[in-house]
Amino acid sequence: MPMQMKDLHHLYACTFLFHFSAYMVIPSITDVTIEALCPGQDQCSLAIYLSGFNQAITGLGTLVVTPLIGNLSDKYGRKALLTLPMTAAIIPLVVLAYGRSRMYLYAYYVIKMFTGMFCDGSMQCLSLAYVADKVCERRRVAAFGVLSGISAAGFVSGTIAARFLPTSRTFQVSASVAAIATVYMKIFLEDSNRGAALADEESTQPLCSAAADAESPPRLPAVRKVLSVVDMISLLRSSLTLTRAATVVFFTSLAESGYQSALLYYLKAQFHFSKDQFADLLLIAGFTGAVSQLLFMPLLAPKIGEERLLNIGLLASFTHIFLYSIAWSYWVPYFSAMLVILSVFVHPCIRSIVSKKVGPTEQGMAQGCVTGIASFASILSPLLFTPLTALFLSDNAPFAFKGFSIMCAGFGSLVAFTLSISMRSTPTISYQKV
């Protein structure tokens, strides 16, 4: 058990450094993009379409790549597959660390599209599978919450660094931290005892009490074939809970991708926000999210269960997106960001629900399938909301409502909330029994 705690601590350190590096550049990228493409302007349709196109292509690649990587990690181990996203994340950061002119910006987006296919979903999928390897079912939702809290802590730290670093240094520091995270992972992180290569019945038991381990699903033979779309569909249809969870993930991701891709451009056009205001807003959201996941979720999850926490999180998610869309003053987005304290419950709860429906050697495949569903939503989101965002932020809007696309995206969370009300726990089922 102490060794497993040590392994989780190393994973948390890698996760923190990875997200510290990734989120450090977010407050700056909007200003850098608009300055390179539309100098001296507060709104730029070209920048909005470029970001939406990048998101759609990345989502398409993630839809295919992430379930495959999750499935391969069941066979070859989590650490071997973690090397790919953590190394790929360094490359686009180096480009903007070298220069931020239009040529470098286009190079950044092209490289980011391809590396994002391996980074955006795989890091989360593999980290969750690693935690599931080490923690039993009874404590898994709290462990997933802690992992999300560590990610949010990296988000907060990166945003604070971006708030005080000049733009010229932000991408250099981000690339350096990403390289350090990869080296740390290769040196200190021990692989988990799951997958075909380590399918010994005497391997280390998950971190939990003996009584709780007795309630865990039996070990199952590893899935040795390469995951296909048909396999994904079969897995998701193997349980009514998995089917509903996949649907909830789809609408939640559709809403989140839609409003996140439009929010910074909307705030810049509506209230003339710049890098510092973006950083302050993201800092509020990240800090409240980290506190909630690290302190409140481990206390609430065992008492009220993942299903009710999921309902609460989805309702809060819709509320805070709706408030963004109708913001009538500059302080409203800051107030809305504080509702993240409840909306952050969504992803750890849905991941825990899915994790409990499959066997221990199918965790990578299951988490990869969920991430693939989220990626599919991120493909559709730019197609639906990018034209709306560009239209309502332009001078040719049919009516004066700059947050209209954000409001439309928010209804995805409302649909997800409605569907989540009927979700109930069902017995664990193995994909191989389908």
Image: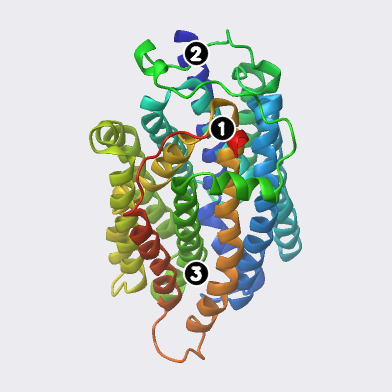
Q: Name the residue under label 3.
A: 265
Question: What residue type is disc 2 on?
Answer: Gln
Question: What residue type is disc 3 on?
Answer: Tyr
Q: Distance between the residues labelled 1 and 3?
A: 37 Å
Regarding mark 3 in the picture, which secondary structure is present there?
Answer: helix
**Neighbour tally class for label 1: few under 14, some 14-19, many 20 plus, Cα within 10 Å:** many
Q: Quadrant of residue 318?
A: bottom left
Regarding mark 2 in the picture, which secondary structure is present there?
Answer: loop
Closer to us: 313 or 154: 313
Q: Mark 2 points at which residue?
A: 205
Residue in view at x 45 percent, y 9 percent: 2
With respect to residue 40, does 338 lie above or below? above
The answer to whether 348 appears left or right of 430 in the picture is: left
Closer to us: 83 or 214: 214
Q: Earlier in the sequence, mark 1 or mark 3?
A: 3
Residue in view at x 57 percent, y 58 percent: 29
Q: How far apart are marks 2 and 3 (CA)?
A: 48 Å
Residue 369 visible somewhere in the drawing: yes
